[in-house]
Amino acid sequence: MQTLENTLNQISNIVWGWPLIILLLGTHLFLTFRLKFIQKYLGTAIRLSLTKSSGSRGDVSHFGALTTALAATIGTGNIVGVATAVALGGPGAVLWMWLTGVFGMATKYAEAVLSIKYRIKTHVGHFAGGPMYVMDLGLKSKWLGILFAVFTSIAAFGIGNTVQANSIASLVKETFNISPWISGIVMTFFTALVILGGIKSIARVCEMLVPFMAISYCGGCLIILCLHVETLPHTIMLILSTAFQGQAAVGGFVGAGVRDAIRYGTARGLFSNESGLGSAPIVAAAAKTKNPVEQALVSSTGTFWDTVVVCAITGLVLVNSGEWVQGLNGASLTKAAFGDIPVIGPLILCAGLLTFVFSTILGWSYYGERAIEYLFGHAAIQPYRWLWVVAVMAGSVVTMPAVWAFADIANAFMAIPNLISLILLNGVIVRETRKHLWDLGLNHPPAKGG
C-alpha cells in the first residue's frame, strides 16, 4: 500500500504541475474577459435559480439541477479539502482557492452553455448532455468525447465516491471510535436507497438536503469566527501575504513556498467547485430551461456558493484557529479547529461532513452513469449504480493518502480535454450569450427545437 501511495503521489505531482495550473487559471481568466465579466450577473442568476422556467424542456427544475450540482460540489472538498490545502500549501492556499472560485464562475457558465446547446434526447425520453456530447457534436471529435466519458466514469469513483466515504468514516472513527466498517455499511445502505431511483429521486433528496446542510455548516463556522473575532484581521493579512511570499516553517508546519500555495489552492479549488472539470454541466443539461444561457447563469452560482462562500469560511476558520501550525492534516486539522466550540463543535463538524459527503455521493453517481450511458448505452446504467454502491463501502476502509492522490489524478485527466474544448468553442459561447443575454435578454423565446 505504501508503494501504491508513493506512486500515485508522484503521478499527481506531475499532472498537477505548472502546465495544468496555467491552463486552468488561464481558461478562467480568458473566459471572464471574453464574456465581459459574466460574474456581474450573479444577482440575476440567483433569482433565476429560485424561479420556474415556463415553456421549457428538460427533466428537472432550475433549482433541482442546481442543488444536484451543489450536492456534488459541496462535499468533503469544502472541509477536508480546504484543510489539506492549508496543511500542504500554507494559509496562502486559501486565497488561491478563493480566486479559483471567483474566476471559475465564468468557466462554469461556459461549460453549461455548451452542454445545453449540444444536449440530446435519448431513446428512453430523458435529456443527456455534458462535455462528451460537446466534443462529439460541437468539435466533431467522437474520440475526444469517448476519452472524456472514460475519465469521468473512472474519476467519479475518486472525487465523488471513495474520497467522500473515506473522509466521513475517518472522522467518525476519530470522534466516536466507531469502526469504518459500521459507518461504511450505513452510508452504503442509504446511497442505494436513493440512487437506484435515478435523477428525479436524486434531485428530490438534494432539493431538501443541500440548503439545510449549507446553512447549518456555515452557521457553525460563523459562530467559531465570532468567538475569535479579535484575531480575524491578522488571519486575513496572513492569508494575503503568504499567497505571494510563501510560508516559513513554524511549529509542526514544515513551510510552503508560493508554488505550493498556488498548486494546492488551485487543485483543491477545482476539487471543490469543479469549474473546468466538466462535471456540473452534465446535470445542467437535464434542466428545464428556455435557452442555454438561462440555466448556465444558474449553474455558475454553484461555484459562488461552493468556493466563494463555503470554502472561504472554512479557510478562515482553519487558519484563524492556529491549529495548522501543529502539523495536522485533513480531518484531524478540521476537527481540532471545530474543537473551539466545546462539546457541540465536533458534532457540528460530523453532521456537516456527513450531509456533505452523502449529497456528493448522490450527485456524482449521476455524472458517472451519464458517462457510462454515453459509452455503452442505457442498459449499462443499472450495473454501474450497483458498482457505485459497492465502492462506497470500499472507500470507507482504504487509506486516505492513496484516495486523495487518485482523485487529483482523475480530476486532471477530466479537466484537460474539457478546458481545451472550452477554448476552441469560445466563439459559440459568446454567440449564445450575445443572442440570449446581451442583445435580446433572457426573455427571448427558445430556439426552434431547443
Image: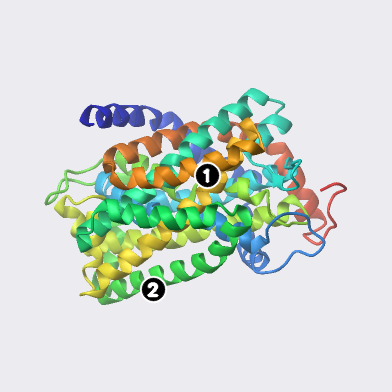
Q: Amino acid at mark 1?
A: Arg
Q: Horizontal and vertical percent for residue 287? A: 69, 55
For label 2, the SS is helix
Residue 191 in view in this figure: yes
Identify the residue at image location x=63%, y=53%: 38
The residue where tag 1 is placed is 385
Q: Nearer the viewer, residue 18 or 158?
A: 158
Name the side, left or right, on which 443 lies relative to 45: right
Near mark 2 (Cα within 10 A), the count class, few <14, some 14-19 or many ≥20, is some
Mark number displayed over residue 135:
none
Q: Horizontal and vertical percent for residue 152? A: 52, 36
Q: Nearer the viewer, residue 339 or 41?
A: 339
Outermost residue, right direction? 448
Q: Nearer the viewer, mark 2 or mark 1?
A: 1
For label 1, the SS is helix
Name the side, left or right, on which 155 lies relative to 39: left
Q: Horizontal and vertical percent for residue 369? A: 57, 42
Q: Horizontal and vertical percent for residue 113? A: 69, 46
Identify the residue at image location x=44%, y=58%: 190
The residue where tag 2 is placed is 219
Question: Looking at the picture, does residue 307 appear above or below residue 4?
Answer: below
Outermost residue, left direction? 251
Picture quarter with the N terminus: top left
Residue 32 in view in this figure: no
